[in-house]
Amino acid sequence: MKKVIRSFFIFLLLSISAFSFGQEKKHNYGNTPDDMVPYGRFQEAYINFFDTPQPFTGAGREKPEPTDLKEVRIGFLGPLDSTALVPQGKMMLKGCELAIEQANKEGGYKGIPFKLMVHNDFGLWGAAANKVVEMYDEHVWAFLGSIDDINTHVALRATLKMEIPMVNSGDPDPTLCETRIPWMIHVISDDRQSCYALAEYIYKVKKLKRVAVMRVDSRYGRVGVKEFREAARRIDHPIVLEIRFLDGDTVFTKQIQRIKDVNPDAVLLWGNAEETALIVNQLRAAGVDVPIFGSDRMVNPTFLKIAGKNAEGIVTTCQYDPSADNPKLEKFKKEFYDRFGEEPDVFAAHAYDGMNIIIAAIRKAGLNRYKIRDVLTDLKTFQGYEGVTGKIIFDDAWNDIGSIYMAKIHDGNFIFFPSPLDTLTSNK
Amino acid sequence: MIHLKFKKGIQVLFVALLILTVSAFSTDRVVNDRDEDATDASGVPATGTYAQILKAAGDMPVYGHWQSFTTENGLPANKAYCVRIDGDRVLVGTSGGLAVYEDGKWKTYTTKDGLGHNAVLAIDVSQLTGDVWLGTLGGLTRWSGGSFYTFTQLNSGMPNDVIYSVACDGKDVWVATGGGAGHYDTYKDQWEIYMERNAPMHEPWTYGVCAGDGKIWIAAWGGGIIEFNKKTKKFRDYTDPDEQMELDVFPDDGVVHDITTGVSYADGILWVATYFGVNWYDGAHWKTFFDKDSGLLSNFNNFNRAVGPVVYYCTDKGLSTFNGKTWVCYQRNEDKPGGNVLITNGPKLTDGVKTTKYAVPTSLSHNFVIGVDANDKEVWIATSHGVSHGERIK
Amino acid sequence: MKRKRLIILLVVVGMLGILYFPAHNAARKHVNYMTAVDNHPLNCTRCHLHMINEGPLYKAVNRTYRSPYNLAISPDGKTLYVVAQESSELLVVDAQEGKVREVLPVGKQPHTVVVTSDGKTAFVSNEWADNVYRIDLTSFGVTDTLHTGNGPAGMVLSKDNRYLYVANSFANEISIFDLSSGEEVKRLLAGHDPAGAAISPDGKTVYVTSRRILKRPYRKPISVELTEVNAVRQRVKTRKLFHDAYIMENVDFTPSGDLAVATLIRPKNLVPSIQVEEGFMMTHGFGVIEPGDSGRIIQLLTDEPNAYYSDPFDIVVSPDGRKAFISSSGVDMVQVIDLDKVRKLIATSTDKELKEYANNRGLSSRYVITRIPVGANPKGMVISPDGKYLYVAERLDDKIGVINTGTYRLEREIDLEGPGKITVARRGRQVFNNAGGTFQNQYACYTCHPDAGEDGLVYNMAGVGMGRNVTNTQTLRDIADIPPYKWNGHNQSVYKQDGMRFSTFLTRTEPFNFDDLDALASYIMTGIKNPPNLRYNPDGHLTPAQKRGEKVFFRTHTNCGKEIPYKSRCYVCHPPPDFTDKLLENVGSLSETDDSIPFDTPQLNNLFNAGPYLHDGRAQSLEEIWTTYDPGDRHGITSDMTKDQLNDLVEFLKSIRDAKYYSKYYSEEYKPLLKALYKHNYYYDLRNGKENEENNH
């Protein structure tokens, strides 16, 4: 009897714990802090779209692996010409090349070498889509790309039709995965994470209230600050000004005057390194001495070079910590330097991780795009992947919700530290 | 005895708790909470079963006697993107070229014949001229009188070479491309591009286009639905009112999501397809349908086409058809021949509205449906693995 | 006093005597320079009177001729309806009396007339007015205007007279009108430059010819399309391609419908023009079409081994279906074809043999019964209902030739009461259209310059380098004010262009005599007008896209705000009104087979219909000039443009019409830009700042 009662209670305990496990409060989508959840304070959503991964139910897995290949082609799509993003694109390419070369030294795919099929996505109008068609015709098994929001989206849509697995390592646009196309995974933390981290840091850690936003008039700027703007509103500190500038602008007098007019507690800049550095200089010269915060693309030597001392104290986000005590990262940095004679940047590091994931997926799944997709998106094979950029954690939309970092400029260098968001989620 | 009773009681309680626990776990499944009465699931339905289906379907057309085509019987490739009924022939866009079914035979046209690319994503036929307009991965191909001519972004004013959708509207041809919506006036031989600079789009990505009611409707990828009034030349947009990508706060308040994949207008109703559910819009009111609250097979909709009062949604779990009142859906069995017809007698599932499943001996060639066309007599669907033809049961 | 006068007279005479020699020398030098020869007669009026292309003197010297182009006949065979192309009239001619009974003004540049089977109604296509007049033949008045596509040309009525099919020559379309409502119900895609139309005896099929070649990859063999329309469904059924042929002007069915025949020319433009002497440049003949899905297409020549019968225009089948008549407008003849022999030839030949016949000039004696000399430049023809008479429009004689089909003789000519006098320019037009100046009558100027425009082909005028420097035929319309000529700009005048070098490289025979050369130059400099640009710019009011494109054309800064180098701006090398600076430029378009030379900047007037583009015709569309053939921004700065901006620019370019309309660019808005051009010593024709009345209404 005692045994029965004991087993009953054990079972009850187990059941309760199972219930409690089953009813464990899930993280909000995109690691959104509770007080920043859309409509969270007044209405539960009728439907949440990204509670479960979108399956791909189409045919194709039955296609046999080709037997007469002399090379296993993997695509690369990036800005390599005719754009200000060429330096980042070339870094991304180098990260991929290093991964491919190393994989080939290890025997490629069953002895067949991998071949990188390189495509520039900044050609004629809508070139990204055409380049995906070229990769389709070249029979690549998967591809990595790109950096520019628009080109990446255009490529993603083409990918959907051509059914080529795509890994993105350079575009933090959160809406990429939110298109629900089950052919792409993100291996870089997106701007949701950056925005929430900045909102937490600015409003809660620094307890600033009135923030003016100055952003580049492009999709990177518009989509990038969207979550920040909405998060600020939800925590009752709506931004006091959102003003734009153009890539290539050098004089920002009008915008700065408007910032002065609203007398903010802080300024958030969202743009490329060169323009934002000029803005910092002109803000300071105009007597705007409030704290300045910024986006990930400001974590760049060009920014430090142009902004000089004015950059001191500026805090941005960064998708990884290049100073992390990570043996994999150290090894990668050395190998990268040995191969290319320069230090890798955030684009090179993430591309290296992304390409290694593609290679691993191909090796596991075999030469079948559908099976490669299955491996990439199964949320098992690469869940918690320890890359040179840190641990990659995918959510159900295949966004990378791994750690985001803050970078503070001190003595002309970026000092990286965990974001308050990271602390929040790890406490849950 | 008491001890025994107590023991029995404990055991009963144990079993009850076990059942409760298991059932509690089982509610975690995300499948639609349908009340499905499987009838005649064993095999070939008797005539009476079709009579039952027809009766249950009410005004809705019912299709059966499905016949499927793959590379084994003439298709150039199993991946079929789109299908169009053109009089006595059927045009199918596949990843291996344009396949034409006529007189019981398939004939294939490829780049060697003049196609812009072998992957044909969209087809429309000009009712005015009979010319066939083919949206390919390599441009817009006009097939006229047996000759092919391809418009590309290099040789013409077309916005981009990847054509997701084509719509013929009298003398005009509209295309949805990655570089904007293109409007080709065949009389003037003139292209106009609509994109973020001259239309209410954030970006120039467009995915679907259709014509109706003096308007052009564009499914703008990330921009909801764009309406172009041909008379006034003015645009207006319909976007997701909650402005959130990850959720829908209220159903029936507008376009379910800004990522739209298809748009089709017929009989005064605009039907919208997305990967997040579908919409009905009568010019004043929006209705939203999800797989969880209606007969819709899946929220993931590749394409839609409205013919008269009926809309055909191409989902990743089969074909859903709907006329605003009744859902009739077609789904093949994954593990055995045949499939099911699922009928939901009401626009949305309620206590009084259930989905009834009827087993049928033939079904779609694949449940991942990408394209559809129908008329009074038949329906053709393009799927991830083959093309299927269904006869209208009367 | 008398003495004083005498002295003055002597002084004047002396002065004149002194001045004579230098003046004579200067005149001689000038004439030598302009004509590129040293023996052209010194007569100022030969050029300076007959080259004037506007004003009272032009009107005094020149005449407006009737220039009959096409004609129809009443069901009773008594009345001819003649389209007078140049005077824009429809003439009613008594076929028996040979008299013009009525003259009805019609639209500009009428092309074709068709008459309903009851003889009560006629339709006239007005090619330069984009409409068709419906004419009541009882009251002889215009009762309706049918608005067509651009350039309505050939027409045919359905058998029940309910539908009218119109070939829109400039727009490459076929308009179908429901005559019960007068509404255009369909517009179908035709071949390139559709011209003639015919309906099958059973009324189920309409054939529409086309003159220019279909687009094809650069320097690849050519083909021309005969469009087959299913007249029941009113849809294009097939596009029958005639390979290696073009200028398919007209088509006709046999009464039984067993065959259709169409005129055509077979150019050999992919080989150097040195082949003229070898009899291998232009051949002329007709196509035979076997109707039906599996029907063959056969090409036969009417030329002989040492004689050519250039520029076949119309083809008419006799009512018994046994003969076909071809008007060979370049040699002033009507050729008679024995269709029975053609049938036999086809029936007894293999497909391979039939293919070879297309280049066989020794075969024509088997089926050409005879060749009947007629008046100048025979064009449209019609046969009497009883089949006894063939009426031929002798365009450049203002007459209708009447041929007895039994004797094959030109029995008489009906004078259409034109001006009578042959002006110098008119004589030049006759020279232009006649192949008599070319080796064995192989081709006329008109052959490569149909309607004095361009034929759209690329030729190698073999000079120094065989196979090198291939060039695209250029238009001759309204070129008086834009020397130099030729792509390399070597010819400072039309005289030079059409003189000695012309005979050396092109006609391969004796050069034109000076009278003919002067006449030819007079015609080219005064008598060839651009058609109105009704499709893209009918009234000078630009569309929004064209206006945006105009801004792009005149822009001075890129989208990024950088100043565009002066010579990289569109308007600098292409300034209005002619849209050419008349200078030689290198826009990076030289190919490996081109000598390293700059090219004469072409004018842009009526550019819309002048493709293919660039000096060697490699750009099949205006877009390709920049999207494909200008990778280094050498042909203007365009790489910064968005696609819609390039579209706008193209729309503006397509809107550019004749130079006479461009007084608008003397407006305040553009003056600074154009004055700047002047300052930079680039050519800029102020045209005396004259406002153009046509542009101001």
Image: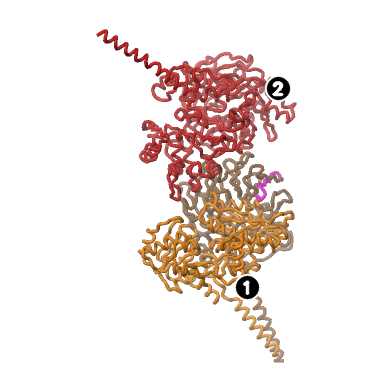
Chain colours: A orange, B brown, C red
* Residue appearing at x 38%, y 22% in the figure: C56
Q: Amino acid at mark 2?
A: Lys
Chain identifier of the residue bearing label 2 in the image? C
Q: Is the stretch drawn in magenta largely helix, strand or loop?
A: strand
Q: Position of residue A359 (x, y in %)?
A: 66, 62
**Front residue of A306 and C435:** A306
Mark nearest the camera among 1 and 2 is 2
Q: Is residue B55 among what the camera can see?
A: no
Q: Secondary structure at mark 2?
A: helix
Q: Is residue B356 among what the camera can see?
A: yes
The quarter in which the N terminus of chain C is drawn is: top left
State the extent of the magenta-drawn residues as a range.
Answer: B93-103
Q: Position of residue A327 (x, y in %)?
A: 61, 71
Q: Amino acid at mark 1?
A: Thr
For label 2, the crowd category at 10 Å Cα-Cα, with few meaning under 14, some 14 to 19 and many 20 or more, is some
Chain identifier of the residue bearing label 1 in the image? B
Residue C172 in the magenta stretch? The answer is no
For label 1, the crowd category at 10 Å Cα-Cα, with few meaning under 14, some 14 to 19 and many 20 or more, is few
CB under 8 Å between discs 1 and 2 = no
Q: Is residue A35 above or below residue A10?
A: above
Q: Position of residue B307 (x, y in %)?
A: 59, 51
View extreme (left): residue: C1
> In the drawing, what numbered circle is on residue B247?
none
Q: Is residue A66 above or below residue C42?
A: below
> In the drawing, what numbered circle is on residue B27?
1
**Front residue of C380 and A359:** A359
What residue sits right under mark 2 in the picture? C341
In the picture provided, is B307 more to the left or to the right than C550?
Answer: right
Q: Position of residue B64 (x, y in %)?
A: 68, 55
Q: Secondary structure at mark 1?
A: loop
